[in-house]
Amino acid sequence: MIHLPFTDRTEAGRLLAVKLASLKLPANVVILALPRGGLPVGLEVAKKLGAPLDVVVVRKLGVPWQPELAMGAIAGGSIQTLDQDLIRALNISHDEINTVIAREKVELERRERLYRKGRPALDLRGRTVVLVDDGLATGSTMMVAARHARSHAPERILVAVPVATDQACLRLQGEVDDCICLASPQPFEAVGEWYIDFSQVDDSKVQHLLEEARKGAEVRTL
């Protein structure tokens, strides 16, 4: 029985890890967390499963005059989705869209360099990929993350989150092999309302968590 709200992302990650461990995933599993909020969750999952942890950097494409409203998302510099219905409804021009995409690509590339520190991304070919975030409201960014992962020829893709809307999970059905979610409360206003501590995860914290995961992986291979 899951009791909401979660204390924080670490607790949510531990609970999610227990659920995933019960699925008896194959030994070739790899965890991909969506920064920034997905990293504390993903680290707990990676530790429990004894799996490597990496990031998949996704950037929301915000409406120019209302940046918190997503008109799409990008990942990996080349994978993108656009909400054409919203774009038409708000009469957003091609030039405005291209300006936002160009700006977010710069930020995506900055984060890739910062988080990886020159290390290559994990090879996903033939592996079971578990995409982890702290929650899903619309599923837009996770959809782009899934498409990015799919472009690297994994055997299976699973989405695993502590909390999500039913609509987000349904939206992802055609993109991934399964969506594991601990709780789908209603009404659902925002992911943060289901955490007592939903403080921002900054770049330095992301780097720290990735380094912790790498050190753990090195110990397991000794």
Image (cartoon, helix red, strand yellow):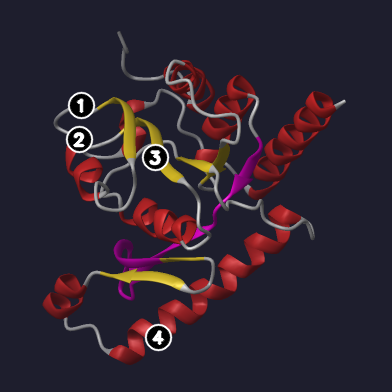
Residue 98: give its label. 4
Say if mark 1 contacts mark 2, CB within 8 Å: yes
Position in image of residue 84 (x %, y %): 20, 75
**Residue 89 located within the stretch drawn in magenta:** no
Residue at the (23%, 83%) spot, across then down: 92
Q: Nearer the viewer, residue 74 or 4?
A: 74
Q: Amino acid at mark 1?
A: Pro
Q: Amino acid at mark 2?
A: Phe
Q: Amino acid at mark 4?
A: Asn
Q: Which residues are magenta?
A: 52-73
How far apart in space, not on screen, are marks 2 and 3 (Cα)?
Answer: 19 Å
Quadrant for the N terminus, please.
top left
Badge 1 element: loop
Position in image of residue 188 (x %, y %): 20, 35
Q: Going from the N terminus, do you reach mark 4 or mark 3 first? A: 4
Residue at the (54%, 46%) spot, across then down: 36
Q: Going from the N terminus, do you reach mark 3 or mark 1 first? A: 3
Horizontal placement of 2 versus 167: left or right? right
Residue 126: give its label. none
Quadrant position of residue 140: bottom left
Residue 185: give its label. 1
